[in-house]
Structures are given as structure tokens and as C-alpha cells.
Image (tube, grey):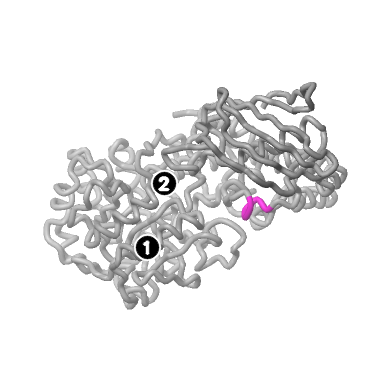
Amino acid sequence: MTTNVQAAANASTCKFSDILADPIVRARWEKVRKFFFLRESTYDMTKRCNIRCEGCYYFNGEKHLATEEQDPAAWRALMVEEKKRGITFVVLAGAEPSLVPELCRVCFETIPLGAIATNGLKAIPRDIDYRIHISVWGNDAASLAVRKAPDMLKRQMELYQDDSRAIFIYTFTPHNIDQAAEVTRMLADNNQRISFNMFSAPVGYTGNLRHNPESLRATAQMMADLLAHYPKTVLYSPYNTTVHTHDQGLHDLFSCPYPRQNSSTDVGLGRSFRQYRTDLSWDRAAACCVPDTDCADCRHYAAGSAVVTARMYRHASHPQSFIAWLDYVDTYLAVWVRHYEKGANLCPASAPVPTRDAA
Amino acid sequence: MSAPEHSAAGEICAQVQLQVDSPWFDGHFPDFPVLPGIAQVSMVVEMVATALALPLYLKSASRIKFKRLVAPDAVLTVHATAENAQQGQYSYRIREGGEEVSSGTIFLAHNDIEYNMQADKSPTTLRVAAIIINELKLEEVTPDSFDPDLDLVDEVGIDSMDLATIALVIRDEFGIRIDEDDYPKLTTLRIIANYIDEKKNEA
């Protein structure tokens, strides 16, 4: 799709009002702007998991040493308090939320917008109408090696067949890049959808899943190919590819606004975000969407959804940057928010990442 | 709200057509929107202040009774009578189609602070107030009545994305550069206006 603004994309800087003068850009801006009310926090739901994956964020650091609150009434009370302090979107994650559906249901009943990160081996009841992210780490042979679970994709696809809540999240490592084509084709054939994540090393990680310049370039090429070949299956944009396969991590590119890297409590994530452990405690010093990730290596999709989105201001000085940012936010909302439908990408090619001085 | 009318009996009266998309109904209550009681009292204050062309605020209230639920599409008639004009005492009643919705007594006072605010407001302040009202779609506030020290984060509930949007519009309008680290600190009308004036003086 071509916009009038793209014709002026070589302009050095541009007024925000000029960028929004394009009706297509204006319409997309108004579409995503309606969701500025989303304020997220994340919650570890249980200490248990039915598999054990190499590099799993949950079992790094001290989170998994917390006690486990299993009382639905305690969770309901937490959700009521979260709602009172303005949280409108919950992310239910570690270790495996599908093992505690009654707690997930309590969260949904109190805060109706949210997402659940699951390995997809146990169905989450359909009345819990959150977005469901099913993690995929390669084809089934690779998953067996890294996650010690046989037939993962086959089982995940069967469990979430015809389930519009589900989006498969493919985590690229240096060793499964080519397998993404096979996985995406299978999901496309089965009318299921996929988005992408990048393996981001936990602090102190010494394994071989950490990305390198060569694997970043190869991943970028694979993402571009899959987006071009499967536009209805792949929820992504060229700008997603740019920022998540950049030589620099998200923090170096955009200065992460999560409390762990942001001491300001004036406004935004630094003010409202919390990452709760299974004992319902939280620690500001460790609070981000993927705690215990090495910030220098963080290219995580969940981090990007907040980090890139929060940097609207610096993207709004140049038409191409802004429509690339709109594509990114449109993708993020489609991946995370139930019933939000992604539009066609407005920026057909990759846009450069603006620096903080761009604004 | 229609223009308030004075009756021969000394009563002030106005008609109010509620708007279904009014923020008053946000969360009050989910799936069952009802006009809050405080909104009804606010209507009376606004009507009397408009009729008398005075900046008035609610000092106290007594014997307030809410008798019927008010739906978002209701058309209300607001009546107020001065019981003791010197003390700002007014009795009021609100009706919907002949049925009384609420009634009570309110005590109003001159808002000297607001007088001073208006006197202090520079063109920059008034223009920024208009931008904030437009971008945040605030109702029941005008650039003149906008409290310059109202905390946009704590008291209005806006987030960083709204602040970024306001910063972009201000950047356009005033032709100034706003540092990415600065706009999250621009949390009141007064702070924003001072920031703009300082930037323009630097240029």
C-alpha cells in the first residue's frame, strides 16, 4: 500500500500534522491510538511446568524460588487491586499457566484483556478469552532436542485447531532459522497464525543459542521471506524485522522503559509496570517483561511490544519512521489483543531506526 | 446543557441532553451505565455559575437525595432556587419527564483561585490548555477554567503515550524542540507553558 506521505519520505524532518494529513496514515493512527489505554503487568502463575526448555527465562534467577500462591481468592484480590491502580492488560506467563486454569479464569473475570504465554501442550479452557501465545522453538525434531518434548508442533496445532485466541510464537535461535519455513507452511496450511520472537539470552547464559551477527542477518532474511510468502499467516512487519534483528539489542536502540532499566516513576511503564512472582510479590529492581534476560541481548518480542511502542515520539519526525512505527504497533496489538485485526503493512520496506535525537 | 433561564419566581432552569459517550459513564458501571450522583450535582453548579456569569465552586451540600437511575440517553431538566443568595445557598431538583431524579441543597462560593488563574493565563497557557482539551477529549473544562496545576497523570489519568502526543502537537504549534527525556515531566499545564516559553526565549 502506498501513501502520499511515502512520496515525501526523503524529507529530513516533518511536522506531525503533516504526517497525519495522509488519510491512510491518519486512519491507522486513530486505529492504534484507541489502545493507548492499555497498561500492562505480568504474572508468574505457577512454579510448575510440564517440560523444561534450555534457556527458559522462568528457571533463571530467583523467581522460581518463590513460594506459590494457589488460592483463587488471593489472586482475585490481587487482580482487583491491580485494576484499581490502573492495570488494564495482564500477561500470564511462567512457568506454565495452562496448569492452573482456575487462576487464569480469576484473572480474566477481573481484567478482561490479556494474554497467556504457554507451551501449548495442555488446552486452556475456551471461556478464558485471552490471547494465547504458543511457543515454538523449531520443528519437532529441534523441539525434542531443546525442549525434550516429542511431536510438539503436531500436538499444539491439534489442541488449538480453530481457536482464534491462538497465535504461534516462533523463537528464532541460530540453529532453527531454516526450520521456520517448514513450521510456517504447516501453520498456513492449517489456517493458523504465527509471529516471531528472538532468543534473548538470560543473564549468565553460556549455551549456544545466543544470536550472533551472522544468525541475525539470516533470521532477518527468513522473516522477510516468510512475511512476503504468507502475509495472512505471518503477523509481522518489515520494521519488526529491522528492530528485532538489529546488531544492537532493544535497550541499546531505544532505552528500555521498564522499571528494571528506568528509575523514573513519572509516567508510563516506569510508574505502573510490575512483574509478579508466584507468591504475588514483586521487585522493582527486577521488573521487566522477561526478567533475568541479559538486557544487552534482549530482542524479545514482548519487550519490543512495549519498548518500541513507547518510543512513538522519536518516530514522529519523519514520515517513513512513523508509518514503520504504526506497522509495528498495529502488529503488536494484533498479536496481543483479542479481536484486534491487523491491517496491511503501510511501510513496504525496512525503515531506519531513529535515534533519540531524531525528535 | 441549554442556556439557563431565569423565571419570574427567581428560579434558574436549564435542560440537559446527556451524551452516551460521556466519560461519566466509563466504569459506572461496566455493562450498566448510569449517571453518577456527583455528575448531577455538577450540572447544578455549572448551571448556576453560567446563569450568574460567576466562577463558582461547590463548597458543601446537604439533604441530597438520589431517587431514580439516570440512563445515558436521558433528557433532564435542572431547577435551582436561591434560598440565601448571600451565602450561596441553593435548593435544587432534577427531573426526567416529570419524575424527580434527585434533589437537595448546595452551598456555592466564588472561586477566587480561579479568578486569579484566569488573570494569570498567558496566550501560551490558553493555547496549551486548548490542545490538551482537544487531544484528551476532556469535557466540562475550557481553556479559561483549566486548572494550570492539575496533574495530568495523577488527576486526569493520562499515560506516556498521551503525553507524547501532546508533546508532538506542541512541537508543531510552537516550533520548538522537545527532548525525549523532557516530555514525560510535562505533567501540568503550568509546567508545559513555562517549558514552551523558556524554549522560545532560548531560540
Residue A307 position (above or below residue B63): below
Q: Which residues are magenta?
A: B151-155
Question: What type is the residue that disc 2 sits on?
Answer: Tyr
Please indicate whether residue A286 sits to the left or right of residue A312 in the image: left
A122 left or right, relative to B49:
left
| Residue at x-position 43% and y-position 38% | B32
Q: Disc 1 marks which amino acid?
A: Tyr
Spot occupied by residue B186 in the image (x, y as percentages of width and height): 69, 53
Residue located at (67% from left, 27% from top): B1
Query: What is the CA distance from the residue labelled 2 to the residue labelled 1?
Result: 19 Å
Dot 2 crowding, Cα within 10 Å, few <14, some 14–19, many 20+: many
Residue B83 part of the magenta segment: no
Report whether mark 2 lies on the same chain as mark 1. Answer: yes
Q: Which residue is mark 1?
A: A43
Q: Nearer the viewer, residue B56 or A343?
A: B56
Q: Position of residue A77 (x, y in %)?
A: 39, 62
Tell me where residue B30 appears, x and y as whole percent.
Answer: 44, 42
Q: Chain of mark 2?
A: A
Specify which label sits upstream in the sequence, 2 or 1: 1
Q: Which mark is residue A332?
A: 2
